[in-house]
């Protein structure tokens, strides 16, 4: 078979191909799949119907998560707002709440409605095998337009994860679950106070 570049020996072609494949692999790994832990609370202590409205991503640069190295950044593999919304919905459902989803607060209805604003979600590689994530999310619970709960939850997770291809996804999921769980417990307490059983 004739070479497309006849002036270069085949070994050079092979080396160039290997370099291209390596670079493609590096570029692909900077996109972080947004996952959530499968293990959730199974304590059935939420007994209300509620709606989870889609979270607003208010970060200045929604397509950037943080620093991977000196020349590249981490970017999310899917929508960060959807990820945080899904996390809250799954945590509420696992505790016994009957949850519906609304694409916006305008379509959420008048019952218990939980919503949120993502103020910061950052992922940085801070060592050879150490990652750090910082998060700040504001959670709001209303009923019939009246605010029952509102607070900004923050969290930081930093730890080494050795020989794990999914380390960035894993540490992001841990960080989100930490603050989502805090918000869920506070909102359930607010619903209990508003409508005790």
Image (cartoon, rainbow, N blue to C red):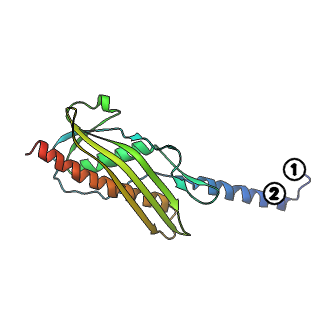
**What mark, if any, has residue 5 been given in the picture?**
1
Taking depth in this image into account, of 119 and 167 the one nearest to the observer is: 119
Q: Is residue 158 left or right of residue 72?
A: left
Looking at this view, name the residue that lies furthest to the top. Answer: 106
Please provide percent x and percent y for residue 28: 59, 53
> Can residue 162 be seen from the camera position used here?
yes
Depicted 154 relative to depicted 192: above or below? below
Q: Is residue 3 left or right of residue 35?
A: right
Please provide percent x and percent y for residue 82: 40, 42
**What mark, if any, has residue 13 been given in the picture?**
2
Q: Is residue 2 left or right of residue 142?
A: right
Instruction: Bin the neighbour count of mark 2 within 10 Å (Cα to Cα): few under 14, some 14-19, many 20 and up.
Output: some
Instruction: Bin the neighbour count of mark 1 within 10 Å (Cα to Cα): few under 14, some 14-19, many 20 and up.
Output: few
Looking at this view, name the residue that lies furthest to the right. Answer: 7
Which of the 4 quarters of the picture holds residue 141? Answer: top left
The answer to whether marks 2 and 1 mark residues whose Cβ atoms lie closer than 8 Å is: yes
Name the element at disc 1.
loop
Give me the residue at 92% from left, 53% from top: 7
> Can residue 38 be seen from the camera position used here?
no
**What mark, if any, has residue 71 been given in the picture?**
none
Give me the residue at 48% from left, 45% from top: 78
Give me the residue at 87% from left, 50% from top: 5
Which of marks 1 and 2 precedes in the sequence? 1
Image quarter in which the C terminus is found: top left
Q: Is residue 156 left or right of residue 163?
A: left
Please provide percent x and percent y for residue 92: 25, 48
């Amino acid at each position: 078979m004739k070479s497309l570049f006849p002036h270069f020996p085949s070994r050079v072609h092979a080396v160039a191909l290997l370099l291209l494949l390596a670079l493609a692999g590096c570029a692909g790994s900077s996109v972080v799949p947004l996952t959530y832990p499968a293990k959730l609370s199974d304590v059935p202590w939420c007994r209300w119907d509620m709606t989870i409205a889609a979270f607003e991503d208010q970060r200045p640069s929604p397509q950037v998560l943080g620093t991977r190295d000196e020349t590249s950044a981490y970017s999310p593999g899917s929508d960060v707002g959807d990820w945080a919304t899904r996390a809250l919905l799954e945590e509420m459902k696992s505790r016994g709440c009957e949850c519906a989803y609304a694409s916006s607060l305008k379509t959420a209805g008048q019952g218990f409605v939980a919503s949120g604003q993502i103020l910061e979600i950052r992922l940085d590689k801070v060592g050879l095998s150490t990652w750090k994530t910082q998060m700040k999310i504001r959670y709001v619970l209303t009923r019939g337009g009246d605010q029952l709960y509102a607070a900004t939850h923050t969290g930081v997770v930093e730890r080494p994860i050795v020989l794990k291809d999914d380390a960035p996804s894993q540490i992001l999921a841990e960080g989100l679950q930490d603050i989502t769980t805090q918000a869920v417990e506070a909102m359930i307490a607010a619903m209990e106070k508003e409508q005790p059983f």
